[in-house]
Amino acid sequence: MTERRDPHDQLAHVLGPSAPEVGCDACFEQLDRYVELELAGIDADASFPGLRAHFAGCPACREEHDSLLALISGDAPF
């Protein structure tokens, strides 16, 4: 069975990010610090422009971000 995606998500995927975006290598280099800033309540997007846009278009990096965020915040399921 094929997963159905929201048409808005499909369109956004085709059009690409509306903001500057970084690549996967830069994302992985900055991800730890980005998550630390998020958890501290600091605007991580201002410090690392392009990461949020990258997460929107890259499922692998978004999953890595979400997993790291859950692990560090203590919300990771065990």
Image: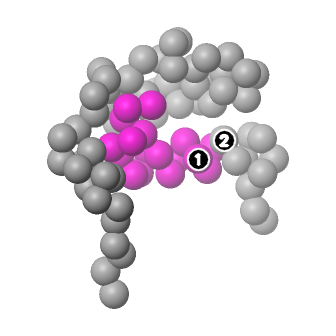
Q: How is the image coloured?
A: one colour
Q: Quadrant of the N terminus?
A: bottom left
Q: Residue flagged by tag 1: what amino acid is it?
A: Asp
Residue that appears at 66% across and 41% down: 69
For the residues bearing labels 1 and 2, Cβ distance under 8 angstroms: yes
How far across and down, in percent of the image, does residue 39 sit?
73, 29
Mark 2, residue position: 69
The answer to whether 54 appears left or right of 30 in the picture is left
**SS of the residue under disc 1:** helix
Is 69 placed above or below 20 here?
below
The answer to whether 16 appears left or right of 39 in the picture is left
Principal secondary structure, stretch drawn in magenta: helix
Residue that appears at 75% across and 22% down: 40
Q: Residue flagged by tag 2: what amino acid is it?
A: Leu
* Quarter assignment of residue 4: bottom left
The answer to whether 3 appears left or right of 78 in the picture is left
Q: Quadrant of the C terminus?
A: bottom right
The local crowd at label 1, few if under 14, some if 14 to 19, many if 20 or more residues have their Cα within 10 Å, is some
Mark 1, residue position: 66
Magenta-colored stretch includes residue 67: yes
Which residue range is magenta in the image?
52-68
Q: CA distance from mark 1 to mark 2?
A: 5 Å
